Image (cartoon, grey):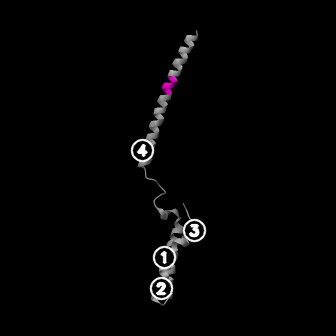
Amino acid sequence: MSKERAKRRAERLAVLEREKAVRARKVARRQRRRAVVRKLTPRVGRPGRLYRRSRGQRIGIVLVPLLAAAAIWLFVPDLGLRIVLTIVIVMALPALVVLVLGRKN
């Protein structure tokens, strides 16, 4: 009686082991397939640094310095001062963007 139960238990365990192996192969195959698909598909939402900001913020980053430069070139009579102030705008723009809009990761 005990030998029969042990034999049936061994058969049951062998079947469970086979099922577990089949399931493990399926899971491994699925993971490999997903990894390949993940490598081949382009990532969306990561096109470049400029796109970390909203459309309105990007428009502001471009328009405000252009308007300031236009005002300088219209209202400042001295050419040397115009050039210096335009360079100051260009050099200070990144710092002002970070200060006003904050740093985004």
Q: Amino acid at mark 2?
A: Arg
Mark 3 to mark 2: distance in Å? 27 Å
Residue at numbered disc 4: 36
- Classify mark 2: helix, strand or loop: helix
User: In terms of depth relative to the viewer, which is nearer, 65 or 9?
Assistant: 9
Tell me if mark 2 has few (under 14), some (14-19) or many (20+) residues whose alpha carbon lies within 10 angstroms of its own: some
Residue contact at pointers 2 and 1, CB within 8 angstroms: no
Residue contact at pointers 1 and 4, CB within 8 angstroms: no
Magenta residue check for 100: no
Of the residues tagged 3 and 1, which is closer to the observer? Answer: 1
Task: First in sequence, mark 3 or 4: give its number.
Answer: 4
Tell me which residue sits at (50%, 25%) in the image.
17
Q: Amino acid at mark 1?
A: Val
Quadrant into which the C terminus falls: bottom right
Residue at numbered disc 2: 82
Task: First in sequence, mark 2 or 4: give its number.
Answer: 4
Tell me which residue sits at (55%, 69%) in the image.
98
Residue segment shown in magenta? 15-19
Of the residues tagged 1 and 4, which is closer to the observer? Answer: 1
Of the residues tagged 2 and 4, which is closer to the observer? Answer: 2
Residue at numbered disc 1: 90
On screen, residue 80 above or below 41: below
> In the drawing, what numbered circle is on residue 101?
3
Mark 3 to mark 4: distance in Å? 38 Å
Magenta residue check for 17: yes
Farthest-out residue, top: 1
- Classify mark 4: helix, strand or loop: helix
Residue contact at pointers 2 and 4, CB within 8 angstroms: no
Mark 2 to mark 1: distance in Å? 12 Å
Residue contact at pointers 3 and 1, CB within 8 angstroms: no
Tell me which residue sits at (46%, 61%) in the image.
48
Tell me which residue sits at (53%, 21%) in the image.
13
